[in-house]
Amino acid sequence: MQEVLQTIGSVTGISLVLALIITLADKWLNDYGEVTVDINKGERKFKTEGGQMLLNALAAQKIFIPSACGGKATCGLCKVQVTDGAGPLLPTEAPYLTAKEQETHYRLSCQVKLKNDMAILIPEELFNIKEFIGTVEQLDNLTHDIKLLRIKLPEGETIKFKAGQFVQLYTKPYGKIKETVFRAYSIASPPSDNTHVDLIIRLVPGGIATGYVHEALKVGDEIRISGPYGDFFLRGDEGINELVMIAGGSGLAPIRSLLYDIAEKGLDYRIRFYFGAVAKRDLYAEEEMAKLEAEYPNFKFVPALSSPAAEDEWDGDTGRITEVVDRYVENADGKEAYLCGSPGMLDACIKVLHSKGFKDDAIFYDKF
Amino acid sequence: MEFSTISPIVIFFASIATSNMILNNFLGMCSYIAISSEYKTATGLGKAVTLVIVVTNAINWVIYHLVIVPLKIEYMQYIIFIMVIAATVQIIEMAMDRFVPDLHVSLGIFLPLITVNCAILGSTLFMVIRHYGLLQAILFGIGSGLGWWMAICMLAAIRERMQRAKLPPGLAGAGITFIITGIMALAFVGFSGIFTIQ
Ligand SMILES: Cc1cc2nc3c(=O)[nH]c(=O)nc-3n(C[C@H](O)[C@H](O)[C@H](O)COP(=O)(O)OP(=O)(O)OC[C@H]3O[C@@H](n4cnc5c(N)ncnc54)[C@H](O)[C@@H]3O)c2cc1C
Ligand code: FES
């Protein structure tokens, strides 16, 4: 008995002493005082305790840098640009950073310790991802199966995004659906209106999120979204003077945002927007597009119906969207293409664009 | 064999050449295999292992003789040694980061990796089994560390030269590394007989 107690006692004693020494060492050695972190050249600044890892310090500020390994330098996702105060590159980081990234001061934020004041650059998209509890301000039918959902952000909060990006919309349990899901929806409003988010949502028969929006949601309801996300936005690379935009159904949403943004900024592009629908009852936003055409003379909206109904009295383009694109787009010179819609439609259109000489680096799309 | 009477100098050389941690005892293999594709990192790791083996050998010797033996808890020595090694590594890393940040960049980041390196615990256990005195233990630590460092550097140098070699797909990576290590160990058999400490 005594032996057991003595063993337990001595091992506990040794652990205690070791723990005490480490704690004291940590207090004394790891005390770097208070440091200031400057994000994106003064856009935001915060003071925090030194000695912690940059990744954790940012997380405490609700700035979420992607990380899949929890800071063990094995996923390489936590890259940020540290322009000042990071110290030399560590061998643990080097394998995850290309020569170009090393040159431009990219670091793994989970390996960079805050020892002194630091200046970092975070891609706007990351810096801007936030969660909002907005209210439904407007919920209108655009067609028989497409609704415009206008969300007002909480008082005093704003969203900063690039035209073309999307948000995640979180549903609440409704009717027979007991779960909460989230789905991606492209922002249809321009970035200049940073207190609202417009979404254009097409009902998917049996769909959880679209069913929620179309059947359960009412004006005045609370709605949770987060964002912005995504890399679908205007590139406008050098030598580009024409934008070919192609969408079907609710794919008009991000294009609408792009168009408003381009028009507001007065960018000088020739723009053709090919919009595919089945019959006239699937067409919407024609008035808006006509208004844009008037304001922005270099823009033309080309709606095309694949099988107009007899009563539609349609005198515009007919045929599948691929045929229309094939008809009007002559070549790829100085052009970038922006596409949004169902995967099937997109794949078919991309094939046509390839045949016109478009390279993959001039074609941008979001598959819904 | 009476180990405790062997001269510390002999122990030092033997632990490099005839009782090499890797090539004769096959201890510390995981990091040896994993971190030997580049000479530069291999040296860094070698230095870190050497430093930690020496420091922990000395501390563990003191703990063994002043705590474990008097309290008659020899059967708990493994746990205690491991705790001491972990704590020591932690403190060395913090101190390095604070006072010699440049050294920390080249060495410090390997320290957490080698907390559980078996060569380090192995070295402590050998010193206990062989009843080394403090000086013997320290020189054994230095020799073991240098021997480990040398072995990983040799392997890294060979692997760097081999980078463009056409290997059969099944051998590339760990396979050929084990074979090289085996051949290196065979070469080291040539030293046997010069000194014997185990
Ligand atoms: C980047 C991005 C942006 C998007 N932007 C928009 C947008 O602006 N407007 C919009 O309406 N949608 C958009 N979507 C699609 C949206 O995220 C949902 O996938 C879609 O609304 C269906 O969600 P649900 O919960 O109603 O259907 P679910 O419950 O997920 O699906 C129900 C059933 O319908 C099928 N299904 C799912 N999606 C579709 C579809 N699109 N067509 C046909 N069948 C389908 C499923 O396979 C399933 O069998 C976008 C998707 C992505 C990836
Ligand atoms: S968080 Fe995985 S590498 Fe930094």
Image (cartoon, rainbow, N blue to C red):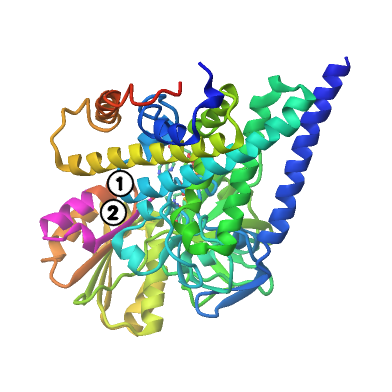
Residue A332 is labelled as none
x and y, in percent, of residue A78 in the image: 47, 55
Residue A360 shown in magenta: yes
- Disc 2 target residue: A308
Q: Which residue is mark 1?
A: B38
Classify mark 1: helix, strand or loop.
loop
Q: Report the span colored magenta.
A: A348-367
Name the residue: 56% across, 61% down: A113
- Near mark 2 (Cα within 10 A), the count class, few <14, some 14-19 or many ≥20, is many
Q: Nearer the viewer, residue B85 or A135?
A: B85
**Identity of the amino acid at label 1?**
Glu
| Residue appearing at x 54%, y 34% in the figure | B136
Percent x, y of residue B39: 30, 47
Which secondary structure, mark 2? Answer: loop
Q: Quadrant of residue B154?
A: top left
For badge 2, the amino acid type reads Pro
Residue at image coords 35%, 40%: B150
Mark 2 CB in 8 Å range of ligand 1? no
Q: Nearer the viewer, mark 1 or mark 2?
A: 1
Residue B178 relative to residue A252: left or right: left
The chain to which mark 1 is attached is: B
